Image (cartoon, grey):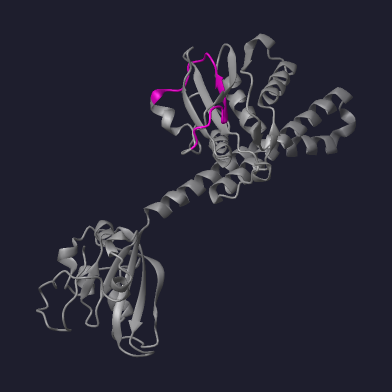
Amino acid sequence: MSVGTSSAPGAQDAGSPPAASRPPGDLAGLGIDPDMLPDGLVIADEQGRVVCFNAAAERITAVRARDALGQSLEKALPLEDLEGRRWWQLTDPYGGLAIRVGQPERNLLLPGGREVLVSARYVRTRPTGPLKRLVVTLRDTEARRRTERSHAELIATVAHELRSPLTSVKGFTATLLAKWERFTDDQKRLMLETVDADADRVTRLIAELLDISRIDSGRLEVRRQPVDIGAAVGRHIQAYVAAGQPADRFLLRVQQPLPDLWADPDKIDQVLSNLLENAVRHGEGTVTIDVTATASLREGEYAENAATSVTVSDEGPGIPEESMNRVFTRFWRGSKRGGTGLGLYIVKGIVEAHGGTITVGRAPGAGAEFRFTLPVAAPAYLA
């Protein structure tokens, strides 16, 4: 454990680290090893010497605990603000205002320019009394940077996807308003149909954004009802045939009997719509949909036929092996893919919100194969 305390203030030579011991203060009383903490923890005593330097602090600062223990805080943790000023000299926790209780979290720089998030707490024996402990927490900024990059990418993608349909809507409506009498009825109908299609595209994008927000925050609601999954797939196939796809391009195989499936019908339709659209647009040959009863994949549940699986496969080029582990991430697009790259991320979120699983692989005909499994999950009041 990367912790040390000295037997009495000033009892040791300034240059030698104190012997390793139990965590100071309340950490010892709670039986908590500072190395178990996810954030960096550095504690200095009343003389400003480091008595605790945990494993996370070692990882974040690249300073070994044995080199930091017993050193002055300013030497063990030489922080600068974003303007290059030495932080401990600037804030002067030991000699500054006695009414201060700490420092809020802020970005500071380690030697070499690496950013860390630092906050501090001043522990005093009494209000306005001398400092007994200075407790410093450190957090790496990389996780925050990844989140910020993801948000920036999402905003850029949404802005790009919205620009095209909104430009079209604005152009056609402005033209119709300015020159209504000059167009024939067929021309007006064509422009209005285009506006209607673009409005639907904007609506779908907004719905995707709302779904992503709910998935990321864990607030995606599932309203379970009885769902005939075979009939649901059949409706999607009929819609494609009505839109001009040949009927023989689809092969639906439903194993009977199927267990009673309780799921959110709208969200399951969303999953089926996305997977079938991918197969039709980006695959080739016959699109095969297999609906089967299967054992649940949930831990501790071994009931036979406790779940329903749906497999959607095509005969196209499939997904490259190196891309398999990125298919369900945000913004993933294959070489021929268009759109926002958010659909499969949402599909995975919906399936997992139902307690199910989804996988991707290679179909027997060398195309892509998506398979999702949903547990029966009847509501508790029917159990």
Residue at position x 26%, y 74% in the image? 24
Tell me residue 119's x, y (percent): 37, 70
Q: Which residues are magenta?
A: 301-321
Compared with 196, 238 (above or below) is: above
Asked if the magenta segment contains residue 320, the reply would be: yes
Q: Quadrant of the N terminus?
A: bottom left
Q: Residue at x 84, y 28 (%)?
A: 188
Q: Main secondary structure of the magenta part?
A: loop
Given the current orientation, which residue lies at the most extreme top position?
A: 248
Q: In the image, is residue 15 above or below residue 376?
A: below
Mark yes or no: residue 29 visible.
yes
Camera-side residue: 31 or 338? 31
Q: Position of residue 352 (x, y in %)?
A: 54, 39
From what the image shows, is residue 350 above or below residue 228? below
Image check: 37 left or right of 317?
A: left
Q: Residue at x 33, y 61 (%)?
A: 37
Point out residue 241 in the picture as x, y percentages from the top left corner: 71, 16
